[in-house]
Image (spheres, grey):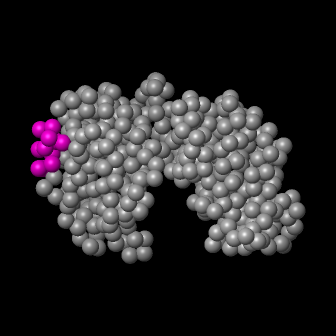
Amino acid sequence: MNSTELDPRLPLIQNADLRDKIVLVRVDHNVVKNGEIHDPYRIDATIGTLYNIVERGGRLILMSHVGRPRDKETGRIKVENNTSIQPIVDYLERKLHTKFSAPRFPVDPDVGIRQVDTSINWHIRDLRAHRIGGIYMPNTRWFEGEEATGETRERFALQLAGLADVFVNDAFGSWQPNASTYDVARYLPSYAGFLMQKELIFLKQVLEPERPFVAVVAGAKYDTKIGPLNEIYKKVDHLLLGGVIYNTFLCAKYDVRVAGVGDDDIRAAKELVRQDRQNKKIVELPFVIESDTLEGRVEGKFRTLDIRNFQPGEEYRYLLDVAPESFDAPGVANVISSAKTILVNAVMGFTPHFYEGSKELDQTIDRNWQAQKLYGGGDTLQEFKNLSPGLYLAAMDDAKYYFFTGGGTVLKAIEEGSPYGLEPVKALMENAVNLARA
């Protein structure tokens, strides 16, 4: 990894004094669903940083968020097993052959964990004495202060900082400026971990790509992707769409109606249609799968449609996938095979029942041996692994592939125009400036 490709203002872990230091590490180990780990890639990607800290004499305290335990309507934080870090602890203990302590703190049924309890000191004593290999804090989103404002947030950030001598952020996938990713960096010497550095270097290939540059973007909601989509459109030579984003584009372009696509989204997509009439960057996937129901792949209730037959005013049921033969269409196949950089942040179909589009997309991209292939997002990687496990394993060791640990972060950085505008990254750089002045 060539650190000269990074912004020189970014403080790097390799320049930190770690000997006999307690090192608080924010990771993005958000890989637990319903109490189980389905793909440990994001955990494995941080192990180099963890090894380096221990090898240089540091002692580990880890923290990550898991899931969304806060109820959006009531604001109540639910402290439940399905958002616990315990499966991650179990995995790390098996992987690293060491003991991790997972402290438990009192829980308020309405606001979650109010504070870091003083019982943590017993665990830190064991950590310093090498009776354990590390401490793994409870899910950061279980804490009242993680996503709060004002004094509650400030108190939590100070409590976290009080645990350690050094802070390392290795959580590229956690771009939101929360207490554990942003505020804590103001109170400790703070550095970017090796995974963070690697992600930033590869992100440069997205922001300054070798051309032709092709992006594939899909999503379940159009409104959440408007900002990134507009910026991606400016940067790419060609753009392929999937999921509800593609359905919305089709509605806006062909003046048709598709079940599940709202009027507001169609109006928003008309601007993209207008841009593309002039620039012609969007490569349409001609064959889509229409289903009468969302209940699954019901025989006799789904069919392949050719979008070139769409007529204004027509109405369709749910479009739940791109048909595999779309990728054999000359315009599509040529664009993918001639690309030098390909960014994929997409699950094309309504899985698990409609998956052929995603599978064919991955296999078509793989046949382009010259392109740098950059995949982002937990769902994107999970479907890649599920649908083409052999290809996924081969790609893990292929220098032409890179898997980002945070697809949302990639889109946010594209929207910002630079990864150094992401708040947690800015916090590291600002802290370095403040330390230099002190």
Above or below for 252 versus 99: below
| Residue 239 at x, y percent in the picture | 71, 46
* Image quarter hosting the C terminus: top left
Q: Quadrant of residue 172?
A: top left
Q: Nearer the viewer, residue 368 or 269?
A: 368
Give the side of residue 112 with respect to residue 75, left or right: left
- 137 in the magenta segment: no
Segment colored magenta: 121-132
Q: Residue at x 22, y 40 (%)?
A: 133
Picture layout, residue 215 above or below residue 141: above
Nearest the eye: 393 or 266? 393
Give the side of residue 358 with respect to residue 44, left or right: right
Q: Position of residue 431 (x, y in %)?
A: 32, 39
Q: Position of residue 300 (x, y in %)?
A: 76, 71
Q: Position of residue 382 (x, y in %)?
A: 53, 50
Determine the residue positioned at 71% across, 41% down: 364
> Can see residue 302?
yes
Which residue shows up at 67% across the image and 37% down it?
A: 366
